[in-house]
Amino acid sequence: MDPSRNDSKPFVCLAFKLEAGRFGQVTYLRIYQGKIKRGEYIYNARTGKRHKATRLVRMHSDEMEDIEEAYAGDIVAAFGVDCASGDSFVTNKDLKITMEPMYVPDPVVSMSIKPKDKKSTDNFSKAINRFTKEDPTFRVHFDSESRETIVSGMGELHLEIYAQRMEREYNTPVVLGKPKVAFRESLTAECEFDFLHKKQSGGAGQFGGVIGKMRPLPPEKNTKLIFTDATMGTNIPRQFIPCIEKGFRMMCEKGILTGHKVSGVEFVLMDGSHHIVDSNEIAFMSAAWGAVRQVFEYGQWNILEPVMLVEVTVPTEYQGAVITQLTKRNGVVLSMGSDSLWAQVVAEVPLNDMFGYTSELRSSTQGRGEFTMEYARYAPAAADVQNELIEQYQQTQDPQQKKKKN
């Protein structure tokens, strides 16, 4: 990027914040290169859609100053630009440039949500659409099994705030279900697979074989899935490699222990086999499914849970009580500090043990304590927590289904 404040290079900007204003959506743009004029057309690099920046303003607190143009280095707000947070824009539609998006962590808590009044369904949908565009950490999906709408975010308070905004801004009171923590399942040791998918009973058949191994990733990558093609030669034609990766990722949507997503594993494809007539995309995708099932069956699995970084600030006389509370919640105190009036305790605590802490802290400090909490990492859950989760999951499964224990 060229940060020169002129129009010698094509315009490139990033939409980093969205806001609903009195005159429609306000899109905040950070300009990295070139120049934009009021009324100019810009193109969304992700969708290819064209938008007209009908109005450009420079923000001064809550005051807007209309401007005619803006250059690299400026942060401006634009009207008439409908997009999602993190989208890149250019004025030359043939320019294939996208800015590196913000790091967006995966949600760690989910709740069911529904409007109290069925008449509010339209406003409920509008609110959901707006909030998911504004905040990439706020996600929504429909669970076909429970027939419920599920919202996911970075904590219980995060989701409660959006529920309050739906009532305040859209006159749509909602009911939130019990919070559910986004546990993960991961391997603890390398496990090999060798699976052949073969259906050749006359007519068009299916044939695909995969050989390789799945292995755990280091702790700093335990929220990722990695596919590695380590094949040599032509035992697996190149056009079928993406199908194998797709099959692997599909199977990782639901683990064997508790039905949570699989993460922190690498699928290493080393060899395989094909048939000149009967090999196709479905055959190799099915082979990948079978390979992951083998690792489900014979691999060593455990459950990961989100760990939160918690900072508690209380009057000094309550410091000991706070440390005791966090320790009872399986927290690990990282640091402590205090002066004559206030004390601060920093700890890592499993998210599953943090529910209800707000009321406990208020009651134990006479309403004078406060805390902040943010996602830190995923780590293996305690053995008793894992056993309880596995038992709960098995109770929901077909009693004839083979049970897997870690």
Image: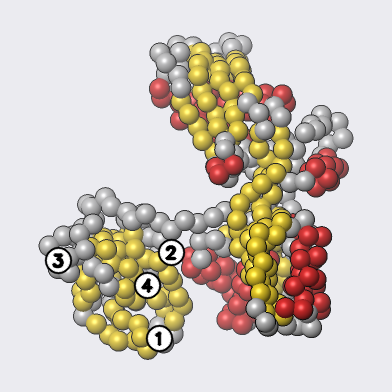
Instruction: Note whether residue 386 is visible.
Output: yes
Secondary structure of the residue carrying numbered label 2: loop
User: Of the residues shown, which amino acid type is indicated by label 3?
Assistant: Asp
Secondary structure of the residue carrying numbered label 1: loop
Distance from disc 4 to disc 2, alpha carbons, whole Å, reads 9 Å
Between 136 and 332, which is closer to the camera in this rendering?
Answer: 332
Residue at coordinates 75% horizontally, 83% vertically from top-left?
367
Secondary structure of the residue carrying numbered label 4: strand
Distance from disc 3 to disc 4, alpha carbons, whole Å, reads 20 Å
User: Between disc 4 and disc 1, whose residue precedes?
Assistant: 4
Please identify, in this view, whether the residue under mark 2 or under mark 1 is nearer the observer. 1
Q: Which residue is mark 3?
A: 7
Q: Is residue 88 left or right of residue 358?
A: left
Q: Quadrant of residue 61?
A: bottom left
Distance from disc 2 to disc 3, alpha carbons, whole Å, reads 25 Å
Q: Which residue is mark 2?
A: 85
Q: Which residue is mark 4?
A: 28
**Where's residue 187, x and y in %?**
66, 33
Q: Which residue is mark 1?
A: 61
- Category of crowding for the residue at label 4, using alpha-carbon neighbours closer than 10 angstroms: few (below 14), some (14–19), many (at least 20): many
User: Of the residues shown, which amino acid type is indicated by label 2?
Assistant: Ser
Vertical placement of residue 23 versus 388, above or below: below
Q: Is residue 99 left or right of residue 248?
A: left
